[in-house]
Amino acid sequence: MHQKEPETLDTFPRLLQSHVKLRPEQDSIRMKDLGIWQSWSWAEAAAEIRALACGLAQLGLKRGEKLAIIGDNRPRLYWGMTAAQALGAIPVPLYQDAIADEMAYVLDNADVKIALVQNQEQVDKMFELRERCPQLEHVIFDEPRGLRFYEQEFLHDYEKIRQAGVEFERNHPDFYEQEVAVGNGDDISIMLYTSGTTGHPKGVVLSNDNVIITARNGIVREELNSHEEVLAYLPMAWVGDNLFSYAQSFVAGFCVSCPEDATTVASDLREIGPTYYFAPPAIYERMLTQVMIRMEDAAKIKRDIFHYFMEHARKVGVKILNREAVSLKDSLLYKLGNILVYGPLKDVLGLRRTKLAYTAGEAIGPEIFDFYRSLGINIKQLYGQTECMVFICVQPDGEVFADTVGTPAIDVEIKIDDNGEIMYRSPGVFLSYYKNPESTASTKTDDGWVHTGDAGYFDDNNGHLKIIDRAKDVGKLNDGTLFAPKYIENKLKFFSFVKEAVLFGNERDFSTAFINIDFDAVGNWAERHNLAYSGYIDLAGQSEIYELIQDCVNKVNRDLSQDSRLGNSQIRRFLILHKELDADDGELTRTSKVRRSFVGDRYSILVDALYSELKECHIETEVTFEDGRTGKLAADVNIRNAEIYPVKTLSRDAA
Amino acid sequence: MSERNLGEVILAVDNISLSFGIMKVLDNISFDIRRGEIRSIIGPNGAGKSSMLNVINGFYHPQQGSITFKGETRKQMAPHRAASHGIARTFQNIALFKGMSTLDNIMTGRNLKMKTNLFWQALHIGPARAEELENREAAEKVIDFLDIQAIRKKPVGKLPYGLQKRVELGRALAAEPDLLLLDEPMAGMNSEEKEDMCRFIIDVNSEFGTTIALIEHDMSVVMDLSDRVLVLDYGKQLADGEPDEVRANQTVIDAYLGVPHE
């Protein structure tokens, strides 16, 4: 980066050109196809991008117009972003598993003119929503499979557009450079739609400076370089993917690998061995659950070795990672464990080479967090938002705590307002919400401070930021006890049997909970205990499973009873939901966060039953399948009472 | 689908009769399959559907009648000849190598495409190596087509039933057959798996132009997929024609739904 005039590298096409000069032969992007990793060097990628940009220009894409990008992480889709940016057009990535209805809103709101999509599945959605989006003129597809007999004029094969671009360039050799020369740091770089826990998604407009300066600051702080390896497997529409797999790759010059298929991510991860990795807590949790399930099925001797060394790692692993002093014996034993257990385990997880792993989005369970850190994987939490291109706070090396999100990132100022809400200001702060001045005004002050909507404070001991909950979600029980639903839900979710939990209690007499079981973990437990079940609904309703979950709820209650402020919000009654909460039914956001009030309305019969004396409740639910069709699901759901523990009070007369 | 232009007759079956002892399994059956079509054979249990398929690929030898495949008429055919002439099939009960991986199972479908001898293959050099690469690529294309990358290296015995069926289809496809015989590919599947399988059958037909003979007893599946349908019952030919004709045929309705009283 320091090589020459970094200030002129203020757009993505210019960053691309600098890599073509500095490292033309080095891989820029990889994709596994037909079982083999195919790679494109920076020079090859630049040629592809050039051709595509010319093809798009010929199709009529002009400065300021929008190109939607829909599909799994694919080199051609990433190139579509740069190609659009080269023309001064604006890429708008969409969540690829959204149904046509949800896409129609975004495409219409963003005035999308051309959509670059992955495959037939997405093309079919474009057909479905085309009438509602009159501005959508062309659809380009990457994979022709199944599209042989589609003859619509607005539908184009990527290969043809690319060819047309190559020919166009032959006649207009200066066109691409001229277009790139016009762009600058103030131009809009990208529009990212936030999934939004309420209402319609909002288009966050970010400038090149927002994106590139923030990406560069992240690289400087963590000392990343052009030799990092990254796996691009999270949705392209999500700000994190845009930062880690696109912006930072273009700034630092490192290579990004695209998995073969959504189902092969785990093995692709192992083959690539990323040095720099991001995953939401749910993925770390799932990996840990898989490991534990497999260890339970392993031979006794292997299991004993595993548990012995994991116990040792729990004792000294985190200290060793933080470079604190440990005894020689402990250090040697840890080295042995590294050969026998930690190394092979990291290999299986695909994290052996990982120098830096981030997690964010939700609170991560302390046991899960410590598990990875004790293995020697430097996993750190960060706190971020789409509105500032991710980085607000990051945990510094050696100062990693499970319950804080660290110190402000480079160039970020943070303050806590009078209501306890966290506010920040940074070079990454977005320009506006697209066509939504009211929301822009209510989120961003005139002098550039942004409301996060999160409640939190700086810890007195270490000065790190600590987040409690969404500011608007923190409520009160009728007796005045503080009710922090997410705090309790997270405690429940730290159990491997609990996949999701939804707490109710605001302005009610006591707290109650919906629980979603983790089908893998509970299913495996059932198998080991010779419990027969025919499917999810059947398993979720069995009394043995209720016992299992009741145990978890009781433990959470005992934990809560130790806290004088939250003790009265112990869970009085709970039930196990008969279906998995699903984004297709609107119960989760596309980033897998529970939409609590929506769930409460949808299952209001069950909520009412929780606040009655009922022991069982019949419910019929409408479900939406991935292709948009709907069906009905009926079940009788049991309701249980949980154990309530006496609340520990801060009594001064104890002694 | 009637406007689809189907090619010449690839397989013609003339007056085939087959009996086991006194059991007459097939009684004077005649029909043809044209290049590029999806041809279904339906009928209740014991109608002789699988026997018909076994006659086509040479596993059973009929007492009477003849089969013309790609212009060559013969009274009986040996299974290995059927395979080398471009007929591949899947089975009602899955017949995969359970201990081998998905990839290896699909590679066995390429067996007849391998020309080098054991000597070169054992050394794994020269032409054998080039051939291996070529066949691996063909197998990988099938894996990509059927969307089974995630199970490429898993032993098939450990896979769920629906996926095993898909692997079996993959092995048949790897042989790049002219005629693909599918024996109840959707038996025992749930509705989602059935839908996937239908999709694959249509895609195989439209992408590769493979001619498909399909045995199935799920009427709704057959009627949506097929160009033409042959109906068998107790070894006899009840009807033959396009789905709409067959659906309206009174004998077929009687056989399937029972004869209405009065």
Image (cartoon, coloured by chain):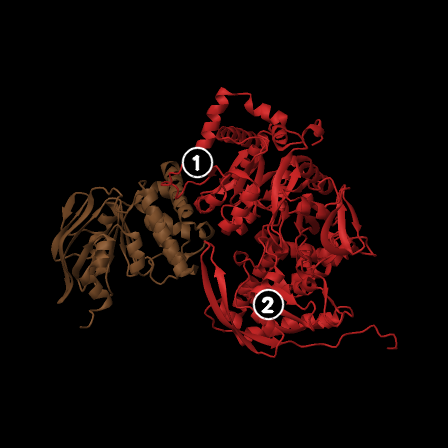
Chain colours: A red, B brown
**What separation in Å lies between label 1 and label 2 (alpha carbons)?**
46 Å
1 or 2: mark nearer the eye: 1
Check the picture and name the quadrant holding the C terminus of chain B. Answer: bottom left
- Front-lying residue, A437 or A171: A437
Q: Chain of mark 1?
A: A
Do dots 1 and 2 share one subunit?
yes
Where A362 sits versus A123, above or below?
A: below
- Does the rendering let one see residue A224? no
Q: Residues within 10 Å of mark 2 (few under 14, many from 20)?
A: many
Q: Is residue B67 left or right of residue B1?
A: left
Which residue, given by chain and number where applicable, does mark 1 sit on? Answer: A156
- How many marks do you count on the picture? 2
Q: Residues within 10 Å of mark 1 (few under 14, many from 20)?
A: some
Name the element at disc 2: strand
- Front-lying residue, A556 or B175: A556
Amino acid at pointer 1: His
Amino acid at pointer 2: Ile
Name the element at disc 1: strand
Where A23 sits versus B128, above or below?
A: above
Q: If you read the primary sequence from the N terminus, does the residue marked by circle 1 or circle 2 appear first?
A: 1
Residue A199, given in percent of the width and then of the height, sits at: 61, 53
Q: Which mark is residue A189?
A: none
Residue A351, given in percent of the width and then of the height, sits at: 61, 50
Residue A55, given in percent of the width and then of the height, sits at: 49, 30
- Front-lying residue, A50 or A2: A50
Q: Residue at x 30, y 52 (%)?
A: B225
Residue A262, given in percent of the width and then of the height, sits at: 51, 50
Q: Which mark is residue A515?
A: 2
- Front-lying residue, B116 or A457: A457
Q: Chain of mark 2?
A: A
- Does the rendering let one see residue A314? yes
Question: Quadrant of the rendered structure where residue A561 is?
Answer: bottom right
